[in-house]
Amino acid sequence: MKKLLVFSLGLVLAVFLASATFAYADDVQEPFPTAGDAYCSATNGCGTLPAGGMTAPMWTTGDYVMSALFDTGQPSINSLTYNFNIWDDLGGGNNETVGYWVNGVEIGTVTVNDCNYCASNVNFSGSFNFASISAQGGGYTLELILQNTIPPGGGSIAFDDGGEATLSNSSGSSVPEPGSILLFGSGVLGIAGFMRRKINL
């Protein structure tokens, strides 16, 4: 009788485990550009973005700001939402195109327009959808890279501290939400307790 009961409860548990589904945390926010991120300007050298400040002025193709490698728990992502500020001091009819990169793959661009040497912060926000990009080396790296060189006298841009990116996977990530883990764990413990009581009868 006990063997039959144990077998029956084991079968119920197996069915429960096979049919269990988790709610996945699809969106992960990451500060970028943010204090401590590395940058390089062909004219003004390399450094790290200071807290509450900005990078050195940039106007040359390849100048960039780059995040440190970070782990979101997502095996891959296919969209990104951004919100950051750029110090715009462009003039003379010159615009700068900035590429947004994830793990060495360009996912889109933003255009910083000539503002007649206004020397002011301009906000950029929006989103990019793209073919799935897998985590590499344990996570992701974000970069903003200048795509064209502004001629002498045409001004410059700089990246401000305080930006944010949201990395998303529309098909679900590998990180179960805490509520789902708690619910699943409670169910397993409940069944285990029930089995133990029945076996001891």
Image: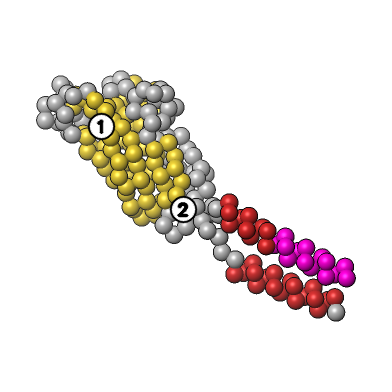
- Which residue is at 61% across, 55% downward? 181
| Residue where numbered disc 1 is placed | 122
Residue 22 image point, x, y percent: 55, 60
Residue 169 image point, x, y percent: 43, 54
Q: Which mark is residue 112?
A: none
| Residue where numbered disc 2 is placed | 26
- Which residue is at 63% across, 55% downward? 182
Q: Secondary structure beneath disc 1?
A: strand
- Which residue is at 83% across, 66% downward? 197
Pointer 1 and pointer 2: residues touching (CB < 8 Å)?
no
Q: Is residue 81 magenta?
A: no
Q: Quadrant of residue 152?
A: top left
Q: Is residue 74 above or below residue 45?
A: below
- Which residue is at 16% across, 31% downward? 114
Q: Is residue 187 above or below residue 95?
A: below
Residue 3 image point, x, y percent: 83, 76
**Residue type highlighted by circle 1:** Val
Please give left or right for residue 44 compared with residue 172 in the image: left
Q: Specify which label sits upstream in the sequence, 1 or 2.
A: 2
Query: Can I make out residue 63 in this image?
Result: no
Decide whether the magenta segment is chiefly helix, strand or loop: helix
Q: Is residue 189 magenta?
A: yes
Please give left or right for residue 150 compared with residue 182 in the image: left
At label 2, counting other C-alpha atoms closer than 10 Å, the crowd grade (few under 14, some 14-19, many 20 or more) is many
Direction right: furthest residue? 201
The residues colored magenta run 188-201
Q: Secondary structure beneath disc 2?
A: loop
What whole-number distance in Å separates the C-alpha atoms at marks 1 and 2? 29 Å
Q: Nearer the viewer, residue 184 or 31?
A: 184
Q: Quadrant of the N terminus?
A: bottom right
